[in-house]
């Protein structure tokens, strides 16, 4: 079963990639979707077996073949299906199936449909290799594979130069992070002599807290996570990646690839448990990223850009939780975020589809009348991401805030500010898009339409998951029998069915009754912000200002703190200047002149010899006689 989980998406990539050009478009889409759905079904069966297995028989290990065996260096192509990889595989294949289904209709008119689905299938395959690999080398193969696929999918509409630049930017910034990851892997092998998770973590468990090598490895691995999961300073690629088709945004930048960094840290919990300094770094960088991205989101008018900065901000929340040692809370938010953020991205795609590819929310308005299903599902996603009570985001954010409050009150206050800002810009986007009056002068309101069933069905499924997703890990106050399901799954070590995924016992985050009342008081504050946003953008029907009309802090936020401009001036422009200089003076004038001179010299000597080799046989006979005479003279004298 584990083989089929991995192989089916690869088969979809090969079949659509090799033969998709001769298949009808409908077959291409359904074929790509069927392979991912088959992988999802296999994952469900294997996960069921995992939960119902006998003690000590839960995980599945599959060794395919030996990849390298040189001296003491041994690496296997091998996979393992434990509870952590099972959760990630369910998200990847489940959300992936819905996005494939959505893409059948969304991309129906695209000439390169077979390439699109083959790239999607290849991405799913690489993501599964990343989370199901049994060693760091397999994880690295998948890590690099999803980086390649993100480049192909972001720049899928390659005839647009700006889209190609966005794909290149994502690829390069991920490579910067990958260098840190690679150095961390070198240190792991140098100090522990293996890449296998079980062997490395067993040896790590014998070390003491604060060991320098654990701190160094933890920080280097986090650099890799910063690239994939878009944390400061390597976060600017993700908003630009919205250049890709909307299903790509939903799959890569909401539910799967950007959570690879979270998976890496949770998988390496044994290392991070011994590196408190590294965890503090993670916490503060996550906080800075969450707050900065939320502030930028306040002034974005592109519906996908708003969601992109929301993703960066939510990823920051997950890293804050990891920095506090709340691994279960971070993974819980990964799950709920996959539901509601995929819903919001696909909902945005439905709006863009109904608006004839318009993405500026200032050109929308009143769409709830024409797109009732999209409106309802988008509302559920909006409520979930803002932490509305009893929806999925409420439970996962509550658990994160509980961990933060017991760890660091300053971080709690600043994280709370980021959450409040999230409520503001998310409802701003919602009210401006779906309420008020229609403001687009290029397309009449009569032409706006609801999306077809293949697009609205995934929205409805994701909306249901966004409502009930909190059941994965209900808090303790929900009752002894139903609370903490995810926590027990990852850290249960009572000698029963499972050995713990979290090798070190996860910290218990206890808060006082006063702090519990403080958390309970957050809901009225959230509702207050909701009323303020509703009054401004619904009752008063305010329209967001254009970027050119912004002043002061608003202009800074609209221009994203000028981070891209500073990167361009600090790195891009100097590198381009050096490249242009080398091209003009070294390549053109030095090397090209030298090579041209060698070529002209060869031509000259060739022209001299051509006078001798003139094709006249009498001359050749004379040369032969002269040569023989010279040989005789040499031998005689």
Image (spheres, grey):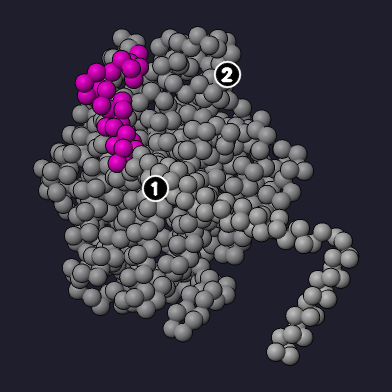
Q: Earlier in the sequence, mark 2 or mark 1?
A: 1
Judge by depth and name the residue closer to the eye, 319 or 358: 358
Q: Residue furthest bottom?
A: 636
Q: Going 21% across and 21% down the picture, which residue do you hit?
A: 552
Residue 234: within the magenta? Answer: no
Whether residue 315 is visible here, answered yes or no, is no
**SS label for mark 1:** helix
Residue 324, x across and y down, in percent: 22, 54
Residue 89, x across and y down, in percent: 49, 55
Q: Going 57% across and 72% down the picture, which residue do you hit?
A: 64
Quarter of the image with the C terminus is bottom right
Residue 553: within the magenta? Answer: yes
How much space separates mark 2 and mark 1, taking CA atoms? 38 Å
Residue that carries the numbered disc 2 in the rendered image: 449
**SS label for mark 2:** loop
**Is 285 placed left or right of 408 in the picture?**
right
Q: Going 47% across and 23% down the picture, which residue do you hit?
A: 359
Q: Which mark is residue 173?
A: 1
Mark 2 crowd level (few <14, some 14–19, many ≥20, 10 Å Cα) = some
Judge by depth and name the residue closer to the eye, 54 or 420: 420
Start-end of magenta stretch: 543-570
Quarter of the image with the N terminus is bottom right
Q: Going 59% across and 47% down the picture, which residue do you hit?
A: 119
Q: Which mark is residue 372?
A: none
Q: Residue furthest right?
A: 617
Q: Residue furthest front?
A: 637
């Amino acid at each position: 079963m584990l083989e089929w989980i991995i192989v089916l998406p690869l088969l979809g990539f090969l079949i659509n990639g090799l033969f998709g050009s001769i298949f009808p478009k409908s077959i291409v889409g359904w074929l790509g979707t069927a392979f991912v759905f088959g992988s999802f079904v296999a994952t469900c069966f294997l996960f069921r077996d995992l939960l119902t297995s006998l003690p000590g028989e839960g995980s599945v290990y599959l060794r395919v073949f030996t990849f390298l065996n040189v001296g003491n260096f041994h690496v296997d192509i091998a996979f393992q299906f434990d509870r952590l990889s099972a959760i990630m595989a369910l998200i990847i294949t489940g959300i992936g199936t819905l996005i494939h289904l959505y893409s059948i209709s969304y991309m129906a008119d695209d000439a390169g449909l077979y390439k699109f689905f083959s790239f999607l299938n290849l991405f799913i395959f690489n993501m599964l290799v990343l989370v199901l690999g049994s060693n760091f080398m397999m994880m690295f193969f998948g890590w690099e594979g999803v980086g390649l696929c993100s480049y192909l999918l972001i720049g899928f509409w390659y005839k647009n130069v700006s889209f190609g630049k966005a794909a290149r930017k994502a690829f390069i910034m991920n490579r910067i992070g990958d260098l840190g990851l690679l150095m961390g892997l070198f240190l792991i092998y140098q100090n522990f002599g293996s890449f296998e998770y079980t062997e490395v973590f067993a040896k790590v468990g014998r070390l003491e807290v604060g060991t320098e090598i654990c701190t160094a490895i933890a920080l280097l691995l986090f650099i890799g996570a910063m690239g994939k999961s878009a944390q400061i300073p390597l976060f600017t690629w993700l908003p630009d990646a919205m250049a890709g088709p909307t299903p790509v945004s939903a799959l890569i930048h909401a539910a799967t690839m950007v959570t690879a960094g979270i998976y890496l840290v949770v998988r390496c919990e044994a290392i991070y448990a011994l590196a408190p300094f590294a965890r503090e770094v993670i916490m503060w960088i996550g906080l800075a990223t969450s707050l900065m991205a939320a502030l930028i989101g306040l002034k974005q008018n592109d519906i996908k850009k708003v969601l992109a900065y929301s993703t960066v901000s939510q990823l920051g929340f997950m890293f804050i939780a990891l920095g506090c040692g709340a691994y279960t809370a971070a993974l819980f938010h990964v799950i709920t975020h996959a539901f509601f953020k995929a819903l919001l991205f696909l909902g945005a795609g439905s709006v863009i589809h109904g608006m004839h590819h318009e993405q500026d929310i200032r050109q929308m308005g009143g769409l709830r009348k024409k797109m009732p299903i999209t409106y309802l599902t988008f509302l559920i996603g909006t409520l979930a991401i803002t932490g509305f009570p009893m929806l999925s985001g409420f439970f996962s954010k509550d658990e994160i805030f509980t961990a933060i409050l017991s760890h660091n009150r300053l971080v709690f206050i600043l994280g709370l500010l980021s959450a409040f800002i999230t409520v503001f810009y998310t409802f701003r986007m919602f009210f401006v898009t779906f309420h008020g009056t229609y403001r687009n002068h290029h397309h009449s309101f009569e032409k706006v339409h609801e999306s077809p069933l293949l697009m609205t069905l995934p929205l409805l499924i994701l909306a249901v998951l966004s409502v009930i997703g909190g059941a994965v890990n209900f808090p303790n106050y929900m009752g002894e029998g139903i609370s903490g399901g995810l926590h027990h799954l990852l850290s249960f070590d009572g000698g029963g069915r499972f050995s713990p995924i979290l090798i070190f016992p996860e910290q218990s985050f206890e808060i006082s009754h006063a702090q519990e009342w403080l958390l309970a008081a957050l809901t009225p504050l959230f509702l207050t912000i909701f009323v303020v946003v509703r009054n401004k953008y619904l009752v008063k029907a305010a329209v967001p200002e254009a970027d050119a009309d912004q002043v002061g802090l608003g202009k800074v936020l609209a221009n994203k703190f000028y981070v891209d401009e500073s990167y361009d001036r600090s790195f891009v422009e100097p590198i381009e200047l050096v490249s242009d200089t080398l091209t003009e003076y070294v390549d053109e004038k030095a090397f090209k002149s030298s090579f041209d001179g060698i070529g002209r010299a060869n031509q000259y000597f060739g022209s001299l010899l051509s006078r001798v080799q003139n094709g006249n046989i009498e001359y050749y006979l004379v040369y032969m006689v002269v040569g023989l005479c010279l040989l005789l003279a040499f031998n005689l004298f």
